[in-house]
Structure formats: structure tokens, C-alpha cells
Image (cartoon, rainbow, N blue to C red):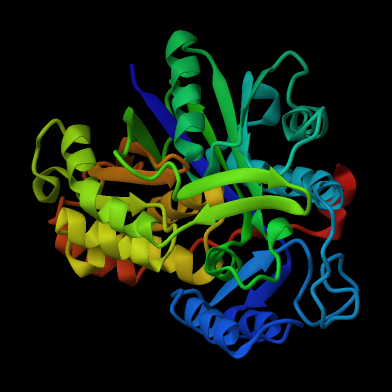
Amino acid sequence: MSTKILSIGTAVPTARLDQWRARDFFAAQPGVDRLTARLIGAAFDQSAIEHRYSVIGQIGSGGTLFSADGELLSVPSTGERNAVYRREAPPLSAAAAREALDRAGVDAAEITHVVTASCTGFFAPGPDYLLVKHLGVPVTAQRTHIGFMGCAAAFPALRTAQAIAEASPGAMVLVVCTELCSLHIRSSRDPEQIVASAVFGDGAGAAVVTAADPRPGRPWLDAGAFSTAITAEGEQDMDWTIGDTGFEMRLTSEVPRIIGREIAGVVEAMLGGGDPLREVDVWAVHPGGRSVLDRVQSGVGLPEESLAHSRAVLRDFGNMSSATILFILQRMLADDSIPDGARIAGLCFGPGLTVETAKLTLHTGTAGTASRSGPAEQGKQAVRSEQVPPAAISEAQRELV
């Protein structure tokens, strides 16, 4: 009996932040001196991000909590920021969940368990409760929330769903990761805060997980082993705390270097000592930033095209914390150039520095129609694949919750 990820759904807010516009907006804030302006320009221009999405509205358009006049970034309290999370996270979660259910061909009434993950806001009853209430999930569904684990939380959420499915073969688990990272942006001269402002965006990803057989003709992922590793260094280099004016991310320049030094050992342990170039066909790596992807690529010795999907999600959405890896896996499910039986290695990075890993196998739903090609060739094909458009949360959907 294997656990299957039947489908993945994604959703983003309607407001798109073009990277160049966001760069100029932050550089124009009061108190930004010439050195800070240069740091802002470098962080935004070298991010490999073209645009991101945000619940706080289009920069420069005016009338938002963070830009009352369209030009100046205000400083809301943590309570004010969390109030926006409470308003915006539920409809975004619901939009991603609906898409996942539709793609799986599963009715909300079939869901037996709900697992949610988020680190960018808190309230109770939370999004897990509202998903049950407004999607038509049975009120008897058992709910689990994974909070404040940062960017790596999607794999613990999927691992929890796998444990549920294996313990209860008839279970149908809905997993939803929702992050509103832009709520915690701020104007700052601190290089770490500048980097955070340059890379983080908002989004939600959802998955339907079960041990039951998938619907015929639909692609799905077989969930294999999950593992966790804590690097020898990094506890002081990536952390996430609650301050008086929002949550505060510390993300130092040492993080990519630590990942670069230790990722080969983590991958070797994940594969039981096997050769990553022979035992992995496709790589799904959380794009904490461009330099993180570069360090993983060089540390494991991967060809340039191996991280095509990860780089594409970074380019189009930025770092959406825990939701990001689900966007990457959704692209892979939609990529018809990846053959049936392709082996996927997933890597996510969170505070600590913690590395969460997953071994997955992609099934096209049409076994036998595609032959396995080498990982390098698959990467070249992946560059040509199209991104599955995420659902944009609408005012009508917002009214449902």
C-alpha cells in the first residue's frame, strides 16, 4: 500500500508586484541613504524574481494598509498585520483547496482529515476550521495545524498526511499551506530585512493525499520516504520571531553557504548513499532565493537544467514560504515531458537550519506511453513546459469565508 498525492492546487492574491516597481518603491522610502539604496537595488535586481503576489495591494496604487497614500510604507502593529491575515488567509486557502479537489476528482464530502500549515499569522478557529465549514467537508473531519515551521513546513504536512493515510487506508486528507509573507515587510537599512523584502511573496498550495487508488487518467505522485536533517550550523542564521511591528525574519548571507557545504551529505543520507545523478530524475528544491538554488546545484553537482521548475517558480512567484514547494510539484504534474515513473527528490529549508526531504515518484496516469530519459534531458524538456496558472482569489471567493 502506498500513499498518493492525487493532485495539487494553488492560489495567489490578485495584486501582482513587479520586481522593478517594488525595488523603486523601497528605495524611495524616507531615511534610505545612498548605501541602502544600492543594497536595495542589488538585492532586488539579483533575486532572479520578475514578479510576486501580495494581499496588501499593488505598490504605488494607494489605499492599502502599508501604503496609505500610495507612496510611503507605513508601520502597522503586529495586531494590525495579523488582522489582515485573518481576513485574507481563509479565502486564499479555500481557493487552492477547491482547485486541488477539482483536479483530483474528489468531492469535499469525501475528506476525512484536514492538515494545514502556516507561519505568517495566527487565529482560532483558524483556516482549518473555516475550510471544513465552507467547503462542505464533513464536520467530523479531524484537523491538524502545523504552525511556525517556516519554509520547510509543507513536507511535515505531507508526512503527517502520509501517516494518517497509512494508518487509515480509507482516509482522504486535504493538505493546505497558506503564507502571507508580504504582511511582514518593512522599510529597513538592515541587509537581512532588505533581502526579505526582495524575495518573499504570498500564496497557497493544497494537496489531496490518500492510500486509495487514483482516478483513471489523472497524473499523481507516489509519496515515498520523508526525512529531516539539522545542519551543524545555522541556528543563528535563519530564524523567525514575533516582534511588535510584525514577524521578524533573520536570513543571513551564511544560509546559502551552509546549504552549499552540507547539502551533499543530506542528499547522500536521503538516498541511502546512492548516486543522485543516477537515482533522481527530477529535482524539486525550495527556492529560498537564487543563491540557495545555486548552492544546491553546485553542492550536489547537478546540471544547470535540473532546477528549471524551481527557478521558474522563483521567477514568477518569489519565495512563498511553505506553499512554494507545492507550486513546484504542481508544475511537474502538468509537465507532459516528464515520463511515467520519474523519481523526484524534494528539498525544503527552514529555520534551524532544518532540511526537510521527500522522495516522490510521478505517475502520468497513462503508464507505458512514455519512456524514462536521463535527468539532464528531462531538465531540458522541463524548461519548455508551461506553468499551471494558479487560481487568483476573487472578491466573490472572499465573501464565501
Residue 120 appears in the figure: no
Between 149 and 282, the one nearer to me in the picture:
149
Q: Tell me which corner region of the image, top left, top right, bottom left or bottom right, holds residue 109.
A: top right
Q: Where is residue 76 in the image (x, y as percent from the top left)?
A: 84, 59
Residue 375: image location, x then y, percent: 17, 56
- Image quadrant where one finds the N terminus: top left
Q: Can residue 182 be seen in this view?
A: yes
Q: Decide which of 291, 379 is in the foreground and name it.
A: 291
Residue at position x 9%, y 47% in the image = 278
Q: Which of the 4 image quarters holds residue 226?
A: top left
Which image quadrant for residue 269?
Answer: top left
Q: Going by the image, does 146 lie left or right of 343?
A: right
Is 243 on the left or on the right of 50, as rendered? right
Name the spot of residue 294 as percent of width and height, x first: 29, 65
Height in image: 350 above or below 1? below
Q: Residue placed at 33% from the left, 36% from the top?
A: 358
Q: Residue at x 50, y 24 (%)?
A: 161
Task: Name the quadrant of the C terminus.
Answer: top right
Q: Which of 56 and 105 is in front in this view?
A: 56
Most distant residue in the top direction: 167
